[in-house]
Image: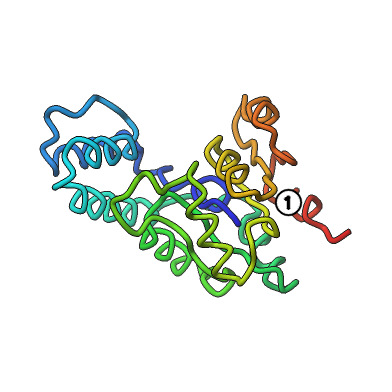
């Protein structure tokens, strides 16, 4: 199970989270929402305080994410990792809090869609089911007829590690920024990598 934003690409590398949050706030006229640079915080705010607008908020965020992935910078080595596991018959499912439409758009744009066994990501306006909740990991395991205990979650955020623990999966923290290695150690990640190609050694058959 592989997170999307970070391990596969930098979703907001050319369309910043701040810009996305600003556009989302303007589109939904969220005058009372807290100031934030995080679009997911706005999604959670709407779901909690303005539930009648939740579907529209999720749809608009999905649209903005899909725009963002058109210019997203690929993570070095991510394509090689996906090709390696596809060739070794070890299925990879993308598990992401980003919208399913944005994930699929990126994979199609970069010719990677055939390398993944599925996409388990946001499809509706229920932020409570996003990581660190284990729901997306459980759904990913079902896609490949496995149990979460048989799966490994690779991600670059605390929520990935927490979701893996909640699901009973092994976890690998991708420490792509300063301070993350120490954070993943505190969270109890089973392994930590600094680059995506290191994953090939971490996941080598025993």
Residue 43's x, y, as percent? 28, 41
Quarter in which the N terminus is drawn: bottom right
Q: How many marks?
A: 1
- State whether residue 85 is above or below residue 18: below
> Which residue corresponds to the image point at 67% horizontal and 71% vertical from the top-left?
86
> Which residue corresponds to the image point at 67% horizontal and 53% vertical from the top-left?
152
- State whether residue 82 is above or below residue 128: below
Query: Which of 84/183 is in front?
Result: 183
Give the colour scheme shown.
rainbow
Return the residue found at the far right: 206
* Location of residue 90 (image quadrant): bottom right
- State whether residue 29 is above or below residue 149: above
Residue 84's x, y, as percent? 72, 66
Residue 63's x, y, as percent? 27, 55
Residue 206's x, y, as percent? 89, 59
At label 1, counting other C-alpha atoms closer than 10 Å, the crowd grade (few under 14, some 14-19, many 20 or more) is some
Classify mark 1: helix, strand or loop.
helix
Residue where numbered disc 1 is placed? 199
* Image position of 132 (left or right of 84): left
* Location of residue 22 (image quadrant): top left
> Which residue corresponds to the image point at 57% horizontal and 68% vertical from the top-left?
116
């Amino acid at each position: 199970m592989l997170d999307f934003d970070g391990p596969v690409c930098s979703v907001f590398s050319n369309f910043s989270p701040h810009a996305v949050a600003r556009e989302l706030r303007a589109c939904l006229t969220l005058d009372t929402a807290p100031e934030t640079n995080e679009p997911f915080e706005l999604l959670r705010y709407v779901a909690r305080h303005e539930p009648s607008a939740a579907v529209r908020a999720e749809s608009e965020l999905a649209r903005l994410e899909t725009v963002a992935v058109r210019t997203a910078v690929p993570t070095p080595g991510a394509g090689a990792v996906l090709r390696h596991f596809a060739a070794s018959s070890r299925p990879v499912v993308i598990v992401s809090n980003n919208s399913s439409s944005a994930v699929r758009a990126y994979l199609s744009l970069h010719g990677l869609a055939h390398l993944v066994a599925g996409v388990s990501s946001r499809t509706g306006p229920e932020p409570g089911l996003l990581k660190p909740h284990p729901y997306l990991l459980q759904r990913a395991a079902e896609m490949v007829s496995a149990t979460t205990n048989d799966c490994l979650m690779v991600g670059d955020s605390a929520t990935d590690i927490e979701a893996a623990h909640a699901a009973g999966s092994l976890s690998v923290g991708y420490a792509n920024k300063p301070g993350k290695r120490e954070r993943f150690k505190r969270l109890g990640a089973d392994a930590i990598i600094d680059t995506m190609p290191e994953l090939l050694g971490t996941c080598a058959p025993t």
